Image (cartoon, rainbow, N blue to C red):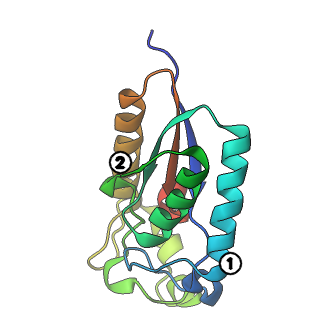
């Protein structure tokens, strides 16, 4: 049996899209001032509670990468970019409000009924889960018996 790897999963800090309740998905949105402060606080917390981390991975999207950089500053670790940690891509529906996705498109209803439901030009829940889980398994295999911090997105991490 191989040694247990512990992955500490972190969702990026706040963006303007979060405040506006708009799905940005693969749209590259930076952190807000509040998000940068959140990233510093989580970096301080992770350093105080998980100083044994040996590696730090992040989605290539700037909001996750900025959050990881703040954490890396506290842990003295470089950020390794992992494209498969990117947010759930909604294709043509990106940039739309959560209320429109819920009410007009009934996106969450469709996804709950069918894990292969795919928004136009986007990804299905099953595709995202497979992509993100594959990345997490690869990361864990690279660091057996260690703690690794992984910074990604709310949609990608909840599937």
In the rendered view of the protein, which quadrant contains the N terminus? top left
Give the vertical position of 79 relative to 109 (above or below): above
Helix or strand or loop: what does disc 1 sit on? helix
x and y, in percent, of residue 37 in the image: 68, 71
Residue found 42% across the figure and 65% down from its top: 87
Which residue carries the number 1 mark? 34
Asked whether residue 98 appears in the rendered view, the answer is no
Which residue carries the number 2 mark? 130
x and y, in percent, of residue 77 in the image: 49, 45
The residue closer to the viewer here, 80 or 24, is 80
Asked whether residue 127 appears in the rendered view, the answer is yes
Which picture quadrant has residue 27? bottom left
Q: Nearer the viewer, mark 2 or mark 1?
A: 1
x and y, in percent, of residue 36 in the image: 62, 72
Residue found 50% across the figure and 84% down from its top: 101
With 41 as the anchor, is 126 left or right in this view? left
Give the vertical position of 40 relative to 63 (above or below): above
């Amino acid at each position: 049996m191989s040694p247990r790897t512990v992955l500490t999963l972190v969702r990026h800090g706040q963006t303007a899209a979060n405040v506006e309740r708009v799905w940005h998905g693969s749209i590259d949105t930076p952190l807000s001032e509040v998000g940068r402060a959140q990233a510093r606080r989580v970096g301080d917390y992770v350093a105080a509670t998980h100083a044994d981390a040996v590696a730090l991975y992040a989605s290539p999207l700037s909001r996750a990468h900025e959050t990881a950089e703040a954490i890396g500053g506290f842990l003295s670790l470089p950020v390794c970019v992992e494209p498969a940690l990117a947010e759930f891509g909604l294709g043509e529906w990106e940039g739309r409000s959560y209320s429109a996705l819920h009410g007009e498109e009934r996106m969450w209803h469709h996804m709950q009924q069918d894990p292969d439901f795919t928004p136009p030009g986007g990804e299905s829940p099953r595709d995202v889960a497979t992509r993100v889980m594959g990345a997490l398994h690869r990361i864990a295999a690279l660091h057996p018996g260690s703690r690794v911090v992984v910074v990604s997105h709310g949609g990608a991490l909840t599937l």
